[in-house]
Image (spheres, coloured by chain):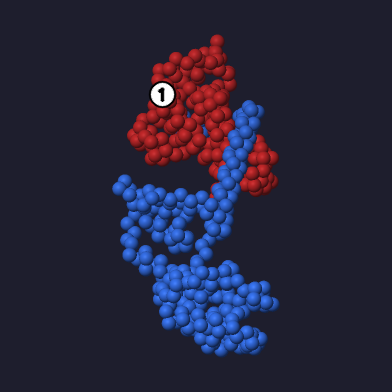
Chain colours: A red, B blue
């Protein structure tokens, strides 16, 4: 396909360290990767930091990519791993945000059309760091609890309980939002 | 309000997030590009480091090359080792006569015959040397007399091995071709030089080192350096002191440091 052909030719340039090829590759993948980073970050700034670190790694390790699986999948894994690293680094510096704080966040007004993508994103971003990470890794990326436990240095039980807590919070918030939508629709 | 199942919740997020695309701000590429630039310049400074390291090695190698040891013959030595040595003698024409007389070596004779004929009438000089040679055979520990002494001794001790090994090479400096009266035995090229075979030296080293046991890293390094560096003062020497191993000597050719033993 035309798309994969351009990726391959860009990859050749990236292996040589050609800055133009690197920029083109970045522009091809940046918006999709930013989508991933946003899910793992609490806000846009944090997401852009992860995106930046992730792409630097991609360009440094591009010659390690042997064409097994899609290149985009490879970049995606690097982004997720960078997000996990960033979380683990922050874990040492910051205290985990208390769950109650999430509830105290001021509620935004929602669209009439129901659950928009950006609303769902906001809900995930409002989760505390640990919950957000486990939810993303398990539900979206498809990691097992065993893998999550290994990557985050926690027990499988902790991974399971964090996931169920994250789900509970999200459900509650969605119901609240639906109720608000319903109320504003009626009113 | 209906309860949401885990499955529904997961499905909702999976579907919505599947193709989530958000344009990052324009600054991000600039930051990535800068970071990559810094990494590249880091690599360049690394290569200059290697260039510097390589040039230091080059200087040391050159130093070792130009100060490599030249083995000198010990003229006074009475050691029987000399008999085994391959001897290279640079002797003027006149000297040659005296050498060849006791030697009886066919090749050399063949080479010298024309010249022998030439010098046949120069009896006084020839007989002088003959006399000395005979004397030296009788008393190898003959004490040198003034100027001519080194040469006489050299011929006394070295001529014998030449006869045995039949490997000597006689070279006559050109300046003596014309006039033998100009002969000056104190000249450097009049003095015999010994080219000691490498194997022999290695044997000596082995015998020497065989007595020492390699007990520490320092003695291991000394052993390896001794194999490579044949000078008396090695490139680097260690000794085992009371508080472990320490450097006892450094020889960089021009710069030598040696601690007292």
Residue drawn at x 69%, y 40% is A20
Q: Quadrant of the N terminus of chain B?
A: top left
Of the pair A129 and B122, the residue shown nearer to us? B122
Residue drawn at x 60%, y 80% is B94
Image position of B224 (left or right of B19)? left
Residue drawn at x 57%, y 58% is B66
Mark 1: few/some/many CA within 10 Å (<14, 14-19, 20+):
few
Badge 1 is on which residue?
A96
Query: x%, y% of residue A126?
Result: 48, 22
Residue A87 visible in the snapshot: yes
Residue B195 visible in the snapshot: no
Query: x%, y% of residue B89?
Result: 55, 75
* A104, above or below B32, in the image: above
* Image quadrant in which you'd find residue B40: top right
* B187, above or below B43, in the image: below
Query: Which residue reaches farthest front?
Result: B124
Of the pair A91 and B52, the residue shown nearer to us? B52
Please give the count of numbered marks on the rendered protein: 1
Query: x%, y% of residue B151?
Result: 53, 73
Say what secondary structure mark 1 lies in.
loop
């Amino acid at each position: 396909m035309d798309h994969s052909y351009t990726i391959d030719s860009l990859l050749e340039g990236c292996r040589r360290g050609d800055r133009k090829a690197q920029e083109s590759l970045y522009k091809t993948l940046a918006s999709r990767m930013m989508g991933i980073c946003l899910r793992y970050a609490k806000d846009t700034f944090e997401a852009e930091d992860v995106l930046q670190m992730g792409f630097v790694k991609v360009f440094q390790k591009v010659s390690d990519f042997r064409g097994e699986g899609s290149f985009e999948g490879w970049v995606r894994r690097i982004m997720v791993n960078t997000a996990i690293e960033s979380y683990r680094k922050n874990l040492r510096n910051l205290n985990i945000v208390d769950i109650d704080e999430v509830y105290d966040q001021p509620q935004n007004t929602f669209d009439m059309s129901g659950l928009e993508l950006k609303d769902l994103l906001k809900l995930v971003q409002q989760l505390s760091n640990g919950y957000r990470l486990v939810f993303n890794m398990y539900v979206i990326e498809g990691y097992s609890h065993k893998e999550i436990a290994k990557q985050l240095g926690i027990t499988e039980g902790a991974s399971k309980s964090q996931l169920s807590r994250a789900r509970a919070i999200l459900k509650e918030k969605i119901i609240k939002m639906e109720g608000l939508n319903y109320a504003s629709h009626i009113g | 309000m209906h309860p949401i199942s885990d499955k529904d919740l997961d499905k909702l997020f999976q579907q919505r997030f599947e193709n989530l695309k958000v344009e990052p701000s324009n600054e991000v590429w600039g930051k990535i590009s800068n970071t990559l630039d810094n990494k590249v310049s880091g690599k360049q400074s690394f290569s200059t480091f290697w260039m510097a390291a390589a040039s230091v090695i080059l200087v040391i190698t050159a130093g070792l090359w130009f100060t490599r040891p030249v083995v000198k013959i010990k003229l006074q030595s009475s050691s029987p080792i000399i008999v085994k040595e391959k001897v290279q003698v640079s002797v003027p024409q006149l000297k040659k006569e005296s050498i060849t007389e006791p030697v009886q070596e066919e090749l050399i004779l063949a080479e010298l015959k024309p010249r022998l004929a030439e010098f046949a009438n120069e009896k006084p000089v020839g007989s002088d040397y003959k006399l000395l040679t005979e004397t030296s055979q009788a008393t190898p520990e003959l004490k040198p007399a003034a100027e001519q002494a080194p040469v006489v001794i050299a011929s006394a001790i070295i001529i014998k091995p030449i006869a045995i090994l039949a490997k000597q090479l006689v070279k006559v400096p050109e300046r003596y071709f014309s006039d033998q009266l100009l002969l000056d035995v104190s000249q450097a090229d009049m003095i015999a030089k010994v080219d000691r075979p490498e194997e022999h030296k290695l044997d000596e080293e082995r015998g020497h080192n065989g007595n020492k046991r390699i007990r520490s890293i320092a003695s291991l390094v000394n052993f390896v350096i001794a194999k490579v560096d044949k000078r008396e003062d090695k490139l680097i020497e260690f000794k085992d002191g009371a508080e472990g191993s320490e450097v006892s000597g450094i020889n960089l050719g021009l710069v030598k440091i040696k601690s007292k033993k």
